[in-house]
Image: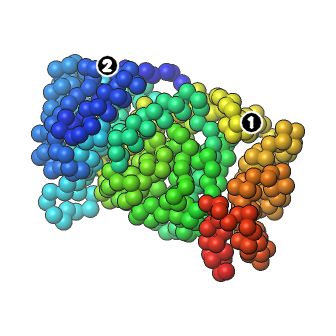
Amino acid sequence: MAEWDAAAETAVVFNPDFPGSSELANYYAEKRHIPKERLIGLRCSQEDSMSRGEFDSQLRQPLLKLFESNHWWIAAPPAPGKPLTGDGIRSPLAQSSRVRVLVLMRGVPFQIRRGPPNPKQSEEDEASVDSELTVLGLNHPPAKGGMRNPYFDQQARFPHFQGSTGLLIVGRLDGPDDPTVKRMIDDAIHAEQTGLLGRAVIDLAQKAGAYQEGEGWLQSSADSFRRAGIPVFIDRSEKVLLDAWPLPDTILYFGWYTDHITGALASPTFRFKRGAIACHLHSFSASIIRSHDKAWAGPLLSKGAAVTFGNVFEPYLSLTLHFDIFNKRLLEGYTVGEAAWNATPALSWMNVVLGDPLYRPFGKGTGAKLGEGADRDYALYQGMVQRMAADTDARIKTALTELAEKRKKLRLLELTALMSALQSKHPEAIDLLEHAGFATRDVADLLRLQLYRAEMLRRAEKADDARRLLREVLKDDAYKNQPALPAAEALLQDMGG
């Protein structure tokens, strides 16, 4: 894959009237070595939303003038455009670009409000500011409805895709407060340098009918993680992950479908691993961004995620970010911004990318760093899975178990159990978890192993054994002060007590 110096083609927009916006822009530019002349201060509304007229006068028109006056693109003669329905693609204003990435800082509005009431379906004029700016370089982009994204599911890095002319990769560094945004910036750079090693979590909702498409994205994402050697835990219940359920070292989370953060991720002690990418699919997941506890986008960032995605208004399922495509591109080495817009079918629509769009967690490939401590265990697991990709799953698990025994690596046994669970080989997972339990005296580790073992017993249709184990856990004084203990009660109640 050809390299691309995305930072050299990035401009940053901030709102001088919004407290902290200028400081954050300068902080980001310094960290990513973006020239000061690429920092753009545009005075605009300090509210979350703006009207279509305000968007045009305060953001779109000033940016068009700046791009032209700074020669950030070479203009093309106007050509008649078609609405992006069917195969129609609007013509670009530019023949080539020197700026392909636009980063919006906290303080720039993220919603364009609906104008005329009761529009026809797919002719809504409300949108995200971000998605509208992806088409800044197109000739007369639509004000009503979305348009087909020509970059959707294209197997090329953004600058090498011939249809990218006139389009921008737009990301937003925004969140509940300034410290959160700075931490998002720092964590992305840290993860690029040290490697993003840990576990993936997939939270299914067992939806059917028209919603089955979303379930498929989640299942396909799990398959991609498994092939890349990233351990995966899938929650297969209709409910979100249970309160206090232990999810250590979570670097990737994708799930659905509640309107506000709840369950395991809302637990007071839960924290994503540094550099994590997380998204909970919901129609209005990013309708609120600057809150620690409302909707999903802000809370996920507050819980330590470096990146999330969402929708500022109703996008319709098929037009939201396709998790399967996003994760495939991310693992192929795309930046977060490239992968996100490559996975989004519509532009001039409702979607936002929250996080550093230049963040490239797997740019050096998965397993590029060996790491220390827990990271070393994940790297050993990942390396073994990748080296033995042509072997059977049984042989891979045997090799992992032997390595765990040889190096006395409890965590490798646990990760191998997750692989067995992913294949619905629950008795095998139960044995591995029990074996891992014999190898540790750490109370937190032992409780987590017991909880996962109880869940595997339930999946193996051994509900009585699962309930018996959970009752023993709840009676054991060794666990009484452990943050994950409420998960035992929650699981027991979920099983009928």
362 left or right, relative to 65: right
| Camera sees residue 152 | no
Indicate the amino acid at tag 1: Leu
208 left or right, relative to 409: left
Task: Name the residue carrying label 1.
Answer: 380
* Colouring of the image: rainbow
Which residue is at the front of the view, 416 or 43? 43
Residue 369: name its quadrant. Answer: top right
Task: Name the residue carrying label 2.
Answer: 35
Indicate the amino acid at tag 2: Pro
Residue 5: name its quadrant. Answer: top left
Which residue is rendered at x = 45% and y = 33% of the image? 186
Residue 454: name its quadrant. Answer: bottom right
Which residue is rendered at x = 22% and y = 54% of the image? 126
Above/below status of 18 relative to 282: above
Q: Position of residue 448 (x, y in %)?
A: 70, 58
Q: Position of residue 411 (x, y in %)?
A: 75, 46
Q: Position of residue 333 (x, y in %)?
A: 54, 31
Which residue is rendered at x = 65% and y = 81% of the image? 496
Callout 1 environment at 10 Å: few (<14), some (14 to 19), or many (20+)? many
Disc 2 to disc 1, how far (Cα)?
40 Å
Q: Earlier in the sequence, mark 2 or mark 1?
A: 2
Above/below status of 220 relative to 42: below
For mark 1, give the secondary structure.
Answer: helix
Which residue is at the front of the view, 76 or 69? 69
For mark 2, give the secondary structure.
Answer: loop
Q: Which mark is residue 136?
A: none
Which residue is at the front of the view, 185 or 90? 185
Callout 2 environment at 10 Å: few (<14), some (14 to 19), or many (20+)? some
In the rendered image, the residue lying farthest to the bottom is 496
